[in-house]
Image (spheres, rainbow, N blue to C red):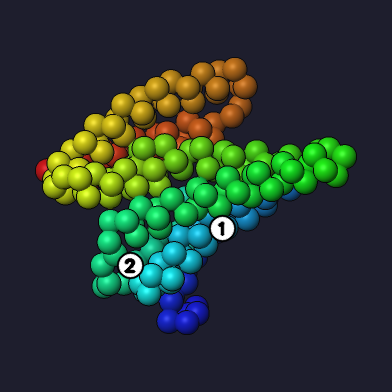
Amino acid sequence: MKIKGIRFRLSFLFALTVAFLIGSGAGESFFITIISALLHEAAHLFCLISYDAPPTEIIIGAAGFRMTKSSKLLSYRQEIVTSLAGVVVNFGIAALMFLLYIYTGRDERLLMPVYANLGLGIINILPIEPLDGGKALYFYLCHRTTEAAARRITERISLAFIIPLFFASFFILIKSGYNLTLLCVTIYLGISLISRANNNR
């Protein structure tokens, strides 16, 4: 499907994940998280379009959008703004929903979008590639030093954050007895980090 020259595709993994979660009885919390994630990705897309560099293709996957960027190069500042736009949107939605929660007599239903957006914002702002915080860190360092040095520093900082994150996710799994989400995310990030490091050698 094409919209204004941008081709949209659903990945098989995304469709499989949605089908699995619906079949397993995932309810309102799942759909709120999906909507929050889509708004997060829409913020990235909005920035690219506003910088006159819309992607040529967007693949909607289980871990978010995968965008094929246009040939137009953005400045490091524009890349940083684009990288952090989704986090800003998630924190903004969380703050707005929390204010609504307070001013509407503390309706418990409003807390789910607060938690979902806070979670997405906090995870994505971590300075770990390929998360938004890691991308923003890399482009900031590119502005200060060479791209090769920026890559090395980003990889080391990513590793320094991913190790305690792994232990934290394992602790949460043991305490909850069922919450695998953070552990799965951490494993995915670790594999991605190792793959990027090997490709850059």
Residue 20 position, x and y percent, is: 61, 49
Count the marks. Answer: 2
Q: Pointer 1: what residue?
A: 38
Residue 152 position, x and y percent, is: 18, 38
Q: Earlier in the sequence, mark 2 or mark 1?
A: 1
Q: Residue at x 40, y 55 (%)?
A: 81
Q: Quadrant of the C terminus?
A: top left
Query: Compared to 37, does 11 lie above or below?
Result: below
Query: Compared to 42, does 144 lie above or below?
Result: above
Q: Nearer the viewer, residue 13 or 148?
A: 148
Q: Residue at x 28, y 50 (%)?
A: 139
In the image, 18: left or right of 60?
right
- Label 2, label 1: how far apart the Cα atoms are: 18 Å
Q: Nearer the viewer, residue 95 or 160?
A: 95
Q: Pointer 2: what residue?
A: 69
Residue 31 position, x and y percent, is: 67, 52
Q: Residues within 10 Å of mark 1 (few under 14, many from 20)?
A: some
- In terms of secondary structure, where does tag 2 sit? loop
Report the amino acid beneath label 2.
Lys
- In terms of secondary structure, where does tag 1 sit? helix
Q: Residue at x 36, y 28 (%)?
A: 161
Query: Compared to 176, does 84 lie above or below?
Result: below
Q: Nearer the viewer, residue 102 or 169?
A: 102
